[in-house]
Image (cartoon, rainbow, N blue to C red):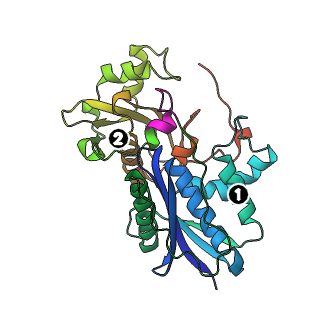
Amino acid sequence: MTIVAAADGSALGNPGPAGWGWYVDESTWACGGWPHGTNNQGELTAVLDLLRQTAHTGEPLLVYCDSKYVINSVTKWMAGWKRKGWKKADGKPVLNVEIMKDLDAAMQGRSVRFEWVKGHSGHPLNEAADKLANGAALAYQDGRTPNPGPGFAGAVEAPAVAPQVARPAPEPDDLLGLLSAEPTATETPAAYSFSAEQGRIDPDWVHRMLAQSYWASDRTREVQDAANKASRCYGVYDAAGNQVAFGRVVSDFAAFAWLCDVIVDPGVRGRGVGKLLMSGIVADLEPYRIGRTLLATEDAHELYAKYGWEPLPAPERWMVRQG
């Protein structure tokens, strides 16, 4: 009989007090966490603990997960990372490599199928796992140890514990940090609004922010204005109407699109503004059912994977002509 479960993670501040949780039913669940960690560590650890606690059963496992980063890491990317000595395609070390290695070992000999579900969409198992993970993170925030739960009957391994890896505050060009940061308790995305209204874009702010980026620091105001005019632009605004985030898409709105120039004001990072921006862009493009949407990034692969992006399936086919 197939074991059906959901697994999820949470981090308050990302990094910050973090938790993980998996849920089968009211009598079969587990959660845990640590005082300092990331959302990705929580999501990975939830799956790892589920694998370990069900290892003795020999039963197939179906895991519902709202993180495409986790699913792709295990099912698509891990084999290549191993061949490269746990290095990514750019030669840099794989993030959360110790958890990845433990996941690889736990997957050996198992029949495991992952199924992506949209977070906070009412899926009962996913909602339960999310509640457990968030509750564990809140417990550590309050200096408490969360109730670990009954676990899986007959489990012989101790619950998984993710390494407590400290992470510095996001730098101006750290898109992964600035976009994946969770809102704090005192400043939530409710204080900000997303808009696709082209007339609200502040060209002065956009050029000033992009001048701080690693990809557009030498771009003139004239070039940026022309690029914005030929693109579909997006913004996030504070309660006073000031722009605090930007992104633009170049597209025929049928077969192809290119997402670029995603930036968040350093003064509001860590408040969920980046996630609000990305969620809004994805939702705005969804009705067009665009066949292929590309982007380029040096440091935010994990973040964009959460919204459906993945490595090029055949990079050897792609070419570029520099202007």
Place of residue 66 in the rendered image (x, y in percent of width and height, measured from the top left)? 49, 60
Residue drawn at the location 68% of the way across and 49% of the way down: 98
Question: Looking at the image, is mark 1 or mark 2 nearer the viewer?
Answer: 1
Viewer-proximal residue, 304 or 60? Answer: 60
Name the main secondary structure of what is drawn in magenta: loop
**Residue kind at label 1, given as amino acid type:** Asp
Query: Residue drawn 40% across and 53% down?
Result: 143
Q: Is there a contact, CB below 8 Å, between mark 1 and mark 2?
A: no
Pointer 2 local density, CA inside 10 Å: few below 14, some 14–19, many at least 20: many
Identify which residue, 102 or 305, lies in the foreground: 102
| Residue annotated with mark 1 | 102
Between 255 and 235, the one lying in front of the other is 235
Q: Which residue is mark 2?
A: 271
User: Could you say where residue 219 lies in the image, as x and y percent from the top left?
Assistant: 47, 16
Q: Determine which quarter of the picture holds residue 110.
A: bottom right
Q: Earlier in the sequence, mark 1 or mark 2?
A: 1
Q: Quadrant of residue 93?
A: top right
- Looking at the image, residue 53 sits to the left or right of residue 287; the answer is right
Residue extending farthest left: 240
Q: Give the image location of residue 165, x and y in percent.
A: 58, 43
Tell me which segment is drawn in magenta: 168-178
